[in-house]
Amino acid sequence: MKAVIQRVLRASVAVDGAVVGSCNHGYMILLGVAEGDTEEDAALLCKKIVNLRIFCDDEGKMNRSIKDIDGEMLIISQFTLLANYRHGNRPDFLASAKPDEANRLYEYFKALAATEIRRVESGVFGAHMEVSLTNDGPVTIVMDSEILKKKK
């Protein structure tokens, strides 16, 4: 499972011109589910993300988590994070989980996040979405559950 975490002042996602999810100060997360990912991957990634200290404290040091600042989260499914671009110029997405399984784990991740974060909103799985955000910093972190598992 891969995630791109962007620290934002605000973010929103629209489908067919209508806003379906938004957040204020917090994270906009693009989440890609790979073939073979499990609930363990979702839990590992979620725990790391909600405890990640990339918000500034009173001294201007990145020392606070999204929980510490009572931040919000916007989570958007993004199968293209699993793109294979090594051969040729047209990527394939064969490493992405099948849609039913990807959606199940995406929903599981959102549910886990909602147990930790006051406000969690999302896009529409599988829809063509328009994402707007005001990056804060900018601060962008890319995480992969496979790398987190190797830490053990």
Image (tube, grey):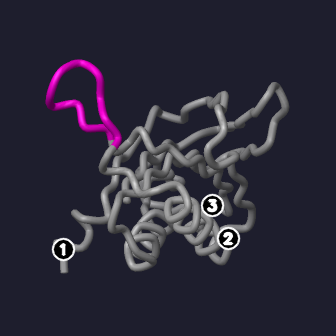
Magenta: predominant secondary structure element? loop
Q: CA distance from mark 2 to mark 3?
A: 15 Å
> In front here: 81 or 3?
81
Disc 3: which residue: 69
Secondary structure, mark 3, is loop
Instruction: Quadrant for residue 133, please give it.
Output: top right
Nearer to us of marks 1 and 3 is 1
The residue at the point 50 percent across, 60 percent down is 102
Type of amino acid at the residue the image marks with label 3: Ile
Disc 1: which residue: 151
Disc 2: which residue: 114
Near mark 3 (Cα within 10 A), the count class, few <14, some 14-19 or many ≥20, is few
Side of 91 relative to 132 (left or right): left
Whether residue 69 is visible here, answered yes or no, is yes
The residue at the point 23 percent across, 18 percent down is 89
Look at the image and give the residue range highlighted in magenta. 83-93
Side of 95 relative to 64 (left or right): left
Total numbered labels: 3
